[in-house]
Image: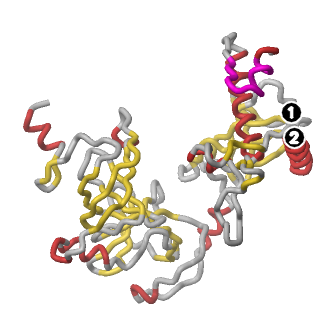
Amino acid sequence: MTAKQLTKGNTRNGEIRKKKLSVGEICDLKITALAPNNIGIDEFSYPFAIFVPNAKQGNIKAKIVKKAVTAFKDSSYAVAQLISTSQDGSNLTKSDSEAISAPVKPGDVLTVNITKKTQKGAGIVELSPDYKIIVPLGQEEVLPKNAKIAITRVKSNYAFSMLTGRGSEASISDKIGIDKDKKDESSKRNLNKLMYGCKFTTIIPENVKKYNNYAILKVRNQILFVRLEKGVMLGRDKVRIKVRRDIGNSPFNCAIGKIIQINPVSKSKKATLVMNSIREMLAHGMHFGEKTVKCHARMKQYIWLHKQGQNKNRPFVKKGQHVINLLKTRRCLNKALSTLTKYALKGRTFLFIGTKKPAAGLVARA
């Protein structure tokens, strides 16, 4: 890469991007976009995005508290803590002043008519002559009407959004003068489609059609290809299926699923098993954590917190010790057990270390 190409790749609008950034450094940032939960984003000062909670658009000073840089540019990011904002209004550019008065906010759910489409398959909603919303549509040929969209990112002259069928409907007639219409029938049909990540339990018929190692099912007027796992008895075993790929926008209107569990436990039996294991953990005193003065800050997400009252969101303390959330402990133990089982089948060797007195004896006897 030549020096000219390197300079071109690290600049935007004549501004040279900085390369080095370390945790604890205080730097000047320029918030160019807003995301949900009141998070500001600096997209162009560094080769990766920097997220700043409780920040508004414009020039700010922030302290870097986290940095995650990988080999892939799109997955690198940093998190900063807001220190101060630009108090002088003259420091704001014209685009910054327009961004502050944007007609939408991150997280808004709107009902709109998509009237235009770009060559790359994105719909455009014109709120005003100077402000637009971009909606990714994929391979849909017909532009949806009365579509619900959720604002995901707000910028100076435009905003990004995504199609959604959830959330409370927000009227935008007060903002842009568009009257509400009736809900489109296509949005109702989308709710009945097999979407990526959805799960359901069924019994695969014994006379099901097969293609290689896949069973062909018809679910919700869609063709579902399910990979048959070893040990599944057709017509007898209940199976839990998860949709791994949704290609409903294609002319074939089909999806691909995977069996994630054979003969899954019912909800009532599962609740009983969980309660029995929790009682056993309580009997062994697994809910007692470290003393409050020794507790690590990262343990906050694994201990019980007060849900209401004056001490809301504060740790629950008993006899000077934090009380551990055994539901999360059980979940983490199951994950650890599945990982150990996976590597034990491969013949791996494990080393268990117990440095505390209660654990040292157990490890020695094991």
Count of numbered circles on the image = 2
Residue 196 position, x and y percent, is 61, 49
Residue at 72% of width from left, 43% of height from top? 289
109 lies left or right of 11: right
- Going from N to C along the chain, the mark reached first, 1 or 2, is 1
Q: Which residue is mark 2?
A: 277
Q: Is residue 322 above or below residue 214?
A: below
Residue at 33% of width from left, 61% of height from top? 83
Q: Indicate the quadrant where residue 225 lies.
A: top right
Dot 1, crowdedness within 10 Å: few (<14), some or many (≥20)?
some
Q: Which residue is mark 1?
A: 234
Dot 1: element? loop
Proximity of marks 1 and 2: CB atoms separated by less than 8 Å: no
154 lies left or right of 239: left
Dot 2: element? helix
Residue 216 position, x and y percent, is 73, 39
Q: Give, as a three-letter code, the residue at label 1.
A: Leu
Indicate whether residue 293 is drawn in magenta.
no
Would residue 90 be seen by someone viewing this image from the given angle? yes
103 lies left or right of 36: left
Q: Quadrant of the C terminus?
A: top right
Q: Indicate the quadrant where residue 238 lies.
A: top right
Cα distance in 3D space between marks 1 and 2? 33 Å
Residue at 14% of width from left, 48% of height from top? 16
Residue 160 position, x and y percent, is 39, 64
Question: Which label lies toward us, 1 or 2?
Answer: 2
What range is drawn magenta here?
Answer: 352-363
Q: Which numbered disc covers residue 24?
A: none
